[in-house]
């Protein structure tokens, strides 16, 4: 496994649309492993492939330590309710903000074995699913319509 470089806000890669994965190659499996390692090393709870400069629809999420969701071609198929909460991004260090997200989302994705999976997430998991799938469409939590207000960092 290897640590990958996380690109930061201002890098045009973060604003591009990622391409679907059509075949789960060894390269995709290595990407999943490296993304998980990179996310953990950066103390994050989610990472999307464009954040490491790779425009493929791949995300990893770990909101509960030890329970990593590796999602290939994730797509939110249902959502319900609202929640407000603090959000941050490994590509936007030091700029947390309050966002309005669905209280619950259902996501369909392919796992590393090629199986079609469906997962319903609430609370932080719902927020992470929204945040990471947004990355695949070039959206960031600081964008208009996502962030409600910034949080001023106390020093
Ligand atoms: Zn992010």
Image: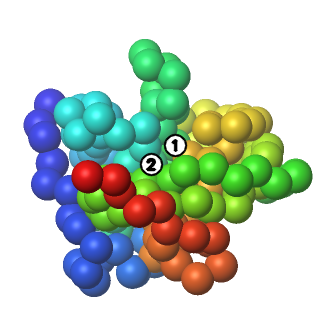
Image disc number at residue 71: 1
In the rendered image of this protein, does residue 104 appear above or below residue 140? above
Q: What crowding class fits label 1: few (fewer than 14 Cα within 10 Å), some (14-19), or many (20 or more)?
A: many
Q: Is residue 26 above or below residue 62?
A: below
Camera-side residue of 56 and 41: 41
Q: In terms of secondary structure, where does tag 2 sit? A: strand
Among the two numbered marks 2 and 1 on one chain, the one whose residue lies closer to the N terminus: 2
The residue shown at (76%, 50%) is 83
Could you tell whether 133 is left or right of 62 in the image?
A: right
Look at the numbered discs 2 and 1 and tell me whether their residues touch, using CB distance below 8 Å. Answer: yes
Q: Residue at x 88, y 52 (%)?
A: 81
| Viewer-nearest residue: 14 or 82 | 82
Q: Is residue 36 visible?
A: yes
Say whether residue 132 is left or right of residue 54: right
**Marks 2/1: CA distance?**
5 Å
Query: Residue 61: horizontal and vertical position, in percent?
Result: 47, 38
Circle 2 is placed at which residue position? 59
Q: Is residue 128 left or right of residue 48?
A: right
């Amino acid at each position: 496994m290897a640590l990958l470089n996380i690109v930061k806000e201002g890098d045009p890669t973060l604003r591009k649309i990622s391409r679907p994965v059509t075949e789960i190659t060894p390269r995709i499996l290595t990407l999943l492993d490296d993304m998980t390692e990179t996310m953990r090393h950066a103390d994050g709870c989610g990472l999307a492939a464009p954040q490491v400069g790779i425009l493929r629809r791949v995300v990893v999420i770990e909101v509960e330590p030890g329970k990593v969701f590796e999602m290939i071609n994730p797509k939110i198929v249902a959502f319900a309710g609202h929640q407000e909460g603090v959000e941050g991004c490994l590509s936007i260090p030091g700029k947390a903000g309050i966002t309005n997200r669905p209280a619950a989302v259902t996501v369909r994705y392919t796992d590393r074995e090629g199986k079609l999976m469906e997962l319903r997430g609430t609370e932080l998991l719902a927020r992470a699913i929204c945040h990471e799938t947004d990355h695949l469409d070039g959206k960031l939590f600081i964008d208009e319509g996502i962030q409600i207000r910034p949080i001023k960092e106390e020093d």
